[in-house]
């Protein structure tokens, strides 16, 4: 039975990553991790694979699917960079804003229609440069701007109300709920719901089902996204094939434009530079990625809600799976496990301390 009301002790989980200074363990980042195959088999876990987890921004590629299935790119002439921004937690650099402004111009969505308030860029260099020039906060700097523009474009195309698009009962949000539920193999009423940082409904489900969603997003075949075609009526098989094609298109857009999906130095963008990966971060310690060729996905939830332990948690899991040596090297090339002080001295390091409980699955 799923525990959809976990206690603090439940959320704490098990040690995943530790930091050392002077050869002594200084901090421990605890949480949960799970490895899932596209057919739903759980291959391994550290902590509780069923811990109730809000998807946060890891939901963005799923939330973009209805816009693709509804013909938004074709109706408005959106290119692959714009599809990547629909999946993005962008950092507000000039390339991000340039693509977002093009999206507004092509779709006719107005910046003031975005439900959240004006922000400064998340990227500190971009923020400093903006303030140096005397620039002001704007809604396009919000990390979720691309997602919201895509949603409003779908509302416009379908004739749905645009001023209430963030409300839970809006047709858009109900379609998003059904999409999440279908990919996670849950009934819509079994998916939890609260309010996200950007004002939209945010969905909750067991951590292993979040990994399952990504395993299916990364898969090319219709069976991975919609069940075995031969086992379904023709209409359902066609719907599954359409979903698989849309998922493959979004995954390809994210890999083609990794820097647009998040930004410089961000783990998801680093991993997306590997052509075998679909990856996305979420707020409050959630990170998920899939390996396309292997047909598996990994979801991590850090109990402290931070991000600094993600790279070593990911590398530790890959090492224990004996997978992705080149990917591990790529991550460590861009994000060092070493910790440096303000004088530039190496004073410690982060290292995985998790033990992945493996399950044999034929």
Image (tube, rainbow, N blue to C red):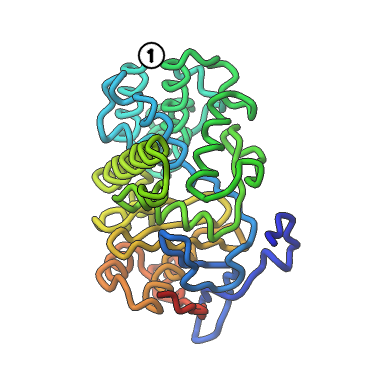
Q: In the rendering, at what x and y percent does residue 309 appear?
A: 49, 66
Q: In the rendering, at what x and y percent does residue 268 appear?
A: 38, 54
Q: Quadrant of the N terminus?
A: bottom right
* Residue closest to the eye, 155 or 319: 155
Residue at (47, 76) in percent of width and height: 352
Residue at (31, 58) in percent of width and height: 292
- Above or below residue 105? Residue 234 is below
Residue 178 visible somewhere in the drawing:
yes
- Above or below residue 218? Residue 111 is above
Q: In the rendering, at what x and y percent does residue 293 appear?
A: 27, 62
* Residue closest to the eye, 203 or 125: 203
Residue 353 visible somewhere in the drawing:
no
Residue wearing tag 1:
108
Q: Residues within 10 Å of mark 1 (few under 14, many from 20)?
A: some
Q: Secondary structure at mark 1?
A: loop
Image quadrant of residue 192? Answer: top right
Side (left or right) of 260 relative to 320: left
Q: In the rendering, at what x and y percent does residue 343 appear?
A: 41, 68
């Amino acid at each position: 039975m799923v525990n959809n009301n976990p206690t603090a002790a439940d959320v704490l989980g098990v040690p995943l990553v530790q930091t050392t200074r002077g050869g002594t363990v200084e901090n421990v980042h605890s949480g949960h991790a799970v490895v899932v195959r596209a057919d739903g088999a759980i291959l391994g876990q550290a902590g509780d694979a069923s811990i109730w987890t809000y998807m946060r921004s890891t939901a963005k590629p799923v939330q973009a699917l209805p816009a693709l299935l509804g013909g938004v790119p074709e109706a408005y002439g959106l290119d692959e960079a714009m599809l990547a921004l629909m999946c993005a937690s962008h950092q507000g650099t000039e390339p991000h804003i340039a693509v977002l402004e093009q999206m507004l111009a092509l779709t006719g969505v107005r910046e003031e229609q975005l439900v959240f308030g004006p922000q400064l860029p998340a990227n500190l260099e971009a923020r400093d440069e903006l303030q140096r020039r005397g620039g002001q906060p704007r809604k396009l700097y919000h990390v979720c701007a691309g997602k919201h523009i895509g949603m409003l474009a779908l509302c416009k195309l379908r004739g749905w109300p645009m001023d209430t698009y963030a409300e839970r009962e809006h047709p858009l949000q109900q379609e998003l709920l059904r999409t999440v539920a279908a990919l996670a193999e849950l009934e819509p009423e079994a998916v939890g719901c609260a309010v996200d940082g950007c004002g939209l409904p945010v969905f909750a489900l067991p951590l292993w089902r979040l990994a399952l969603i990504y395993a299916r997003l990364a898969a090319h075949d219709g069976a991975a996204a919609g069940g075995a075609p031969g086992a379904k009526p023709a209409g359902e098989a066609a719907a599954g094939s359409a979903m698989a094609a849309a998922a493959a298109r979004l995954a390809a857009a994210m890999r083609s434009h990794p820097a647009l999906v998040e930004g410089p130095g961000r783990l998801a963008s680093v991993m997306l530079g590997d052509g075998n990966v679909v990856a996305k971060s979420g707020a409050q310690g959630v990170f998920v990625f899939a390996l396309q060729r292997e047909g598996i996905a990994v979801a991590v939830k850090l109990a402290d809600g931070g991000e600094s332990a993600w790279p070593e948690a990911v590398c530790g899991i890959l090492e224990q799976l004996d997978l992705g040596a080149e990917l591990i090297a790529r991550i460590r090339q861009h994000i060092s496990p070493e910790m440096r002080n303000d004088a530039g001295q190496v004073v410690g390091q982060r290292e995985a301390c998790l033990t992945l409980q493996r399950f044999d699955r034929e």
